Each structure stands twice: as structure tokens, then as C-alpha cells.
Amino acid sequence: TVAVSEPSAAPGPGWDCPLSQEVWADLGQLAQTTPHLKGLVQPLLESPSLDHAMVLLLSNLLGDPYTVPRESVQAMLTVVQDEDLGRLLRADLQAVLDRDPAVSQYSVPLLHFKGFQAIQAHRHAHALWTSGQESAALWIQGRVSKVFQVDIHPAARIAEGLLIDHGTGVVVGETAVIGPNCSILHAVTLGGTGKHGGDRHPKVGARVVIGAGASVLGNIHIGDGAKIGTNSVVLMDIPEGATAVGAPARIIGGHRRKPA
């Protein structure tokens, strides 16, 4: 049995925003009510901020004692000091609470949802990639793929508020762009067609929902608020607010367009 200290009575000054304070309160309650998880939760409570707690958790999940241990992963994740990472973390957490009816506490996606964890790892990999540290970024991509079964190229650009529900089998290519407040289910591919190099992956607008098993392929545009049905194969632009279903996808619900 590993002895752990009692949690602090209040969060430190780095947990200053209301969302961070609620996360800290959730974790503190979990440490008290579920003793078997206290060894997981206590170091997060003792972290100076939510951002640091996220890095610590990712380091524990992604570290490999035989190749790149958790201390090295933690150092890798903190090489680039980007304040925007904290804003994106909070927006992604809020997205899960707002859009996943199975979740009522911030601590749930933080600790348990690999889709959320994979997004946060990608955001650090993207920061490394854009700062010229491509080898480190690619290591994180590969490790996330092995651990979480989510494969997002570190060059892919992802705006705030992304929800990846369940996560298994999601693939996002190098030149893909995902707009704010999108929802993606498991086994979704944002990929190329294999016919072109360069800019070859989809550009997804804001508030788009992509159903499980859908493949969106090529340098095409998915308009704001569009919905892509389960197992659809999309090879053409989808207008704003439209719903596309089928393989190949066709637009239903008033938008008239020939199948791709």
C-alpha cells in the first residue's frame, strides 16, 4: 500500500479560474470517496495549476520506462510555453460537459476519456511541430496512436472546443483543419484520396458533427453546422447546415446535390 498525503484544503493560485476550481473540487471529492484512485488523483491536486496537472497526467499515460520515461515526456510537453494551450484545454473540457450527456463532472474526461486526452496530447505535439521540433512532435503522435488508438498528425490544425467521443480509430491527416466546437465520433477518418500531395485533407468548419465510421477524404470543405452520417464516405464539399449520408455521400433535407 502506498501512503498518500491528505489533499490541500484549497487549490493553489494557479487554479484561479472558475472551471479550474471546479475541476480541483471534483478531484478532491474523488480522492476522498474513492481511496483506490487517490494515488492517481493526489499528484494532480498538488499540481500548481490545471495546465500542469494535465501535463503530469499525460506524462504518466504516455511514458514508457523502456524507451522514453514519464520524466522525459513531461519535459517534452513543457518545452514550448504557450499560454494558448491552457485556453484550449478549458474549452475542450467545457465541450465535453456541454455535449456529452453521459458526463456531469469535469474530472471524468480529464481522468478517463482517451478522446479528450488524445486532443490535449495533440495540442502539445502541434506546438512542438510549429516551433520546429518535429521529431518530438512525431514521437508524441506515434505514442498517442499506440496508447489511445487516436492518430492525429501534429501539423493538423484544430480549433477550440473539439469533442472526440470514444476516440478509437480516429485518424486526422497532416493538412486537415477542424473548426471550433466540432464533434467527432469513433473511427472517423479525415484523410486524403491518395491522388495528390501537398494540401490534401479536409477543411471542417465550425460546429460540424461527424458520425462514427465516416470517412471525409480529400481537400474538400465541410460547411459550418453540417452533419455527416455514420459510415458515410464524403468526397465533395458539403454546404453549411447540410446533412450528408451514404457511401458515396449524398445531401438530404432540402439541399440538392449529386452524389460524390
Image (cartoon, rainbow, N blue to C red):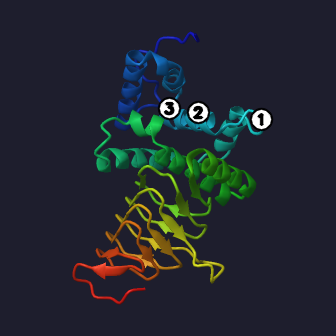
Q: Tell me the mark number nearer the camera, choosing from 2 and 1.
A: 1
- Mark found first going from the N terminus, 2 or 1: 2
Q: CA distance from mark 2 to mark 1?
A: 19 Å
Q: Which residue is mark 1?
A: 66
Quadrant in the rendering for residue 20: top left
Which mark sits nearer the N-terminus, 2 or 3?
3
User: Hey, which quadrant is residue 253 in on the image?
Assistant: bottom left
**Residue 137 location (% of width, % of height):** 68, 53
Instruction: Specify whether 45 is left or right of 121.
Output: left
From this viewpoint, which residue is outermost toward the right?
A: 67
At label 3, counting other C-alpha atoms closer than 10 Å, the crowd grade (few under 14, some 14-19, many 20 or more) is many
Tell me: 219 left or right of 62: left
Check disc 2 and report its element: helix, strand or loop: helix
The tag on residue 56 is: 2
Q: CA–CA distance between discs 1 and 3?
A: 29 Å
Q: Which residue is pictured at 74% across the width and 39% down the height?
A: 68
**Which numbered disc, 1 or 3, marks the residue closer to the eye?**
1
Specify the amino acid type for callout 1.
Tyr
The image position of residue 22, as x and y in percent, is: 35, 31
**Placement of the C terminus among the 4 image quadrants:** bottom left
Q: Amino acid at mark 2?
A: Leu
User: Within 10 angstroms of label 1, few (less than 14), some, or many (20 or more) residues?
Assistant: few
In this picture, is 8 found above or below 188? above
Residue corresponding to mark 3:
49
What numbered label is drawn on residue 107?
Answer: none
